[in-house]
Amino acid sequence: MHRKELLALLDAHQTRFMEEAAFIARARDFVKLHKDCFHCNLWPGHVTGSAWVVNPRRDRVLLLHHRKHAQWFQPGGHADGDADILRVALRETSEETGLDPSHIRLVDGAIFDVDIHSIPASDRGPQHEHIDIRFLVEMDDDLPIPGNDESHQVLWVPLPQVARFNNNRSTHRMVEKTRRLRHV
């Protein structure tokens, strides 16, 4: 996948959320402007990939308590120069859950959600933005999830309780999208 494939995915992604629609437009502009948008040393931001992991009944979500940010998030991370952002999201999901990729099922290859959020300055670099491209994946919630050293804890959280762990707007948006999927 190259920038043009990501741009095609962004062009195809439709949302009913006004804030996300603005993120899609900003992401499209950013990717067009920066040939090196998949490199984590690009400031003021870079493209990242993540996965919204649900169980097959889609009534539970997998969240990880990240050591670095001391917050609960979905699996995801830097592309490290890999322009195939879907592959990045799946790789990060496998690495952060500690599960073999065979246990991670991509629902489809379409974007599930787009978010742009600020990352505070640290010893790794200045304050910058993550243009996070998110995909929907399923995983059996009866599998033991070993996790890895990037997280303090990994939990399956019932969909109605997700806000207790992470109440930011993008998480709320993904919960709402998941609720709608359950009623389709």
Image (tube, rainbow, N blue to C red):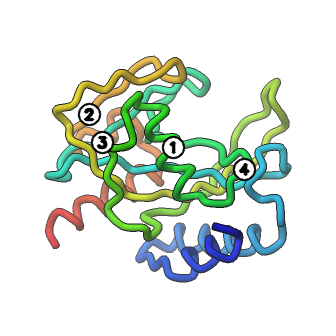
Q: Mark 4 touching mark 1, by CB under 8 A?
A: no
- Whichever of labels 4 and 3 marks the residue nearer the N terminus, that label is 3
Name the element at disc 2.
Answer: strand
Q: Mark 4 touching mark 3, by CB under 8 A?
A: no
Name the element at disc 3.
Answer: helix
The residue that label 2 is drawn on is 156
* Mark 1 nearby-residue class (10 Å; few <14, some 14–19, many ≥20): many
- Whichever of labels 2 and 1 marks the residue nearer the N terminus, that label is 1
The residue that label 1 is drawn on is 91
Q: Which mark is residue 103?
A: 3
Identify the residue at horizontal 33%, vertical 44% (top origin).
Answer: 102
Does residue 26 appear left or right of residue 14 in this picture? right
Vertical relation: 50 (above or below) 123: below
Report how far apart the C-alphas of labels 4 and 3 lie in the structure: 31 Å
2 or 1: mark nearer the eye: 1
Vertical relation: 89 (above or below) 108: above
Vertical relation: 28 (above or below) 175: below
Q: Amino acid at mark 2?
A: Trp
Q: Which mark is residue 129?
A: 4
Report how far apart the C-alphas of labels 3 and 2 lie in the structure: 15 Å
Report how far apart the C-alphas of labels 4 and 1 lie in the structure: 21 Å
Name the element at disc 4.
Answer: strand
Position of residue 148 measured from the top left corner of the image (x, y, whole percent): 47, 21
